[in-house]
C-alpha cells in the first residue's frame, strides 16, 4: 500500500515538473512601451549616433501636458537620450566638440531649447544639472502630421526629433577648423 502511494506521488511530481518546465519555457515578455532605438548617419563629415527611448503618443496630449512647457525633458523615454559625434561640429552655428553627450530639450510653444550635457548616462532628467551643459541652442519647431512614435532622423542638414505633431530640426555644419 505504501509503495503504491509512493509511486503515485512520484508520478504526480514528475508531471508537475514537466508542466512547470513547459510554462517556464513560454515567452511571457510583453513588448516594451518605450523600446530603445538608435539612428546613425554622417552629417558635415561627422559620424552621428543618437540613442533614445521611443515612447508612443497612445491618445495622449504630449506638448504642454505630458511633457510640460518650460521643463527639461530627456528627449526620449526612460534613460536620457545620448548624442555622439566623432568630430567637432557646429550645431546651429555653435561649436560642439567630438564626444558623447546627454541630449535634453526644454519645449516651449514658440521656441525650444536644445541641450547637450556632459553627463551622457543618466536616468531621465531627474538628476539633470544645467551646470554640466556644454551647449544650448534655441530651435523653432515645425508642425507636422501626427507621428505616433518618437523618432529621430538624420539627414545632410542635421537631425530631427519628431513626435506627436512637432518636428525639431537641429542644423549641423562643419567647423571652420578641420
Image (cartoon, rainbow, N blue to C red):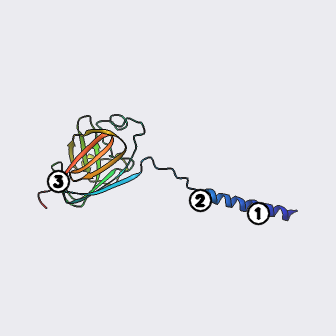
Tell me which label, 2 or 1, sits earlier in the chain. 1
As measured in the structure, the alpha-carbon distance from the residue carrying label 2 to the one carrying label 3 is 51 Å
Mark 2 against mark 1, which lies toward the viewer?
2
Residue at 60 percent across and 57 percent down: it is: 24
* Quarter of the image that includes the N terminus: bottom right
Local SS, label 1: helix
- Neighbor class of circle 3 (other Cα within 10 Å; few <14, some 14-19, many 20+) is many
Task: From the image, tell me which residue sits under label 2.
Answer: 25
Q: Is residue 105 above or below residue 15?
A: above
In the picture, the disc for residue 173 is: 3
**Disc 1: CA contacts within 10 A as few (<14), some (14-19) or many (>=20):** few
Q: Which residue is drawn at 23% across and 47% down?
A: 170
* Residue 131, position as x, y percentages in the image: 24, 48
Q: Distance between the residues labelled 3 and 1?
A: 73 Å
> Residue 41 appears at what percent x and percent y?
27, 57
Residue 115, horizontal then vertical, whole percent = 25, 47
- Tell me the number on the disc at residue 28: none
Q: State the residue at coordinates (42%, 39%).
A: 58
Q: Name the residue under label 1.
A: 10
Asked if the residue under mark 3 is in contact with the one under mark 2, i.e. CB atoms within 8 Å, the reply is no
The residue closer to the viewer here, 78 or 129, is 78
For label 2, the SS is helix
Q: Residue at x 26, y 34 (%)?
A: 109
Q: Earlier in the sequence, mark 2 or mark 3?
A: 2
Q: How far apart are marks 2 and 1 (CA)?
A: 23 Å
Q: Characterize the local packing of mark 2: few (<14), some (14-19) or many (20 or more) Cα atoms within 10 angstroms.
A: few
Q: Do the residues labelled 3 and 1 touch (CB within 8 Å)?
A: no
Along the horizontal axis of the image, is 161 left or right of 138? right
Is 156 left, or right, of 56 in this rendering?
left
- Specify the quadrant that holds the C terminus: bottom left
Looking at the picture, tell me which residue is in the foreground, 154 or 52: 154
* Mark 3 residue element: strand
Amino acid at each position: 500500500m505504501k509503495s503504491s502511494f509512493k509511486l503515485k506521488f512520484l508520478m504526480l511530481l514528475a508531471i508537475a515538473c514537466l508542466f512547470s518546465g513547459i510554462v517556464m519555457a513560454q515567452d511571457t515578455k510583453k513588448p516594451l512601451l518605450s523600446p530603445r532605438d538608435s539612428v546613425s548617419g554622417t552629417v558635415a563629415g561627422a559620424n552621428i549616433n543618437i540613442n533614445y527611448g521611443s515612447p508612443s503618443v497612445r491618445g495622449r496630449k504630449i506638448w504642454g501636458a505630458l511633457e510640460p512647457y518650460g521643463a527639461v525633458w530627456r528627449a526620449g523615454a526612460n534613460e536620457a537620450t545620448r548624442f555622439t559625434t566623432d568630430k567637432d561640429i557646429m550645431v546651429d552655428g555653435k561649436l560642439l566638440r567630438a564626444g558623447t553627450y546627454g541630449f535634453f530639450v526644454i519645449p516651449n510653444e514658440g521656441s525650444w531649447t536644445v541641450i547637450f550635457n556632459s553627463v551622457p548616462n543618466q536616468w531621465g532628467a531627474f538628476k539633470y544639472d544645467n551646470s554640466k551643459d556644454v551647449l544650448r541652442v534655441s530651435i523653432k519647431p515645425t508642425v507636422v502630421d501626427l507621428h505616433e512614435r518618437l523618432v529621430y532622423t538624420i539627414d545632410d542638414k542635421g537631425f530631427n526629433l519628431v513626435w506627436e505633431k512637432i518636428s525639431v530640426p537641429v542644423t549641423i555644419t562643419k567647423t571652420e577648423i578641420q
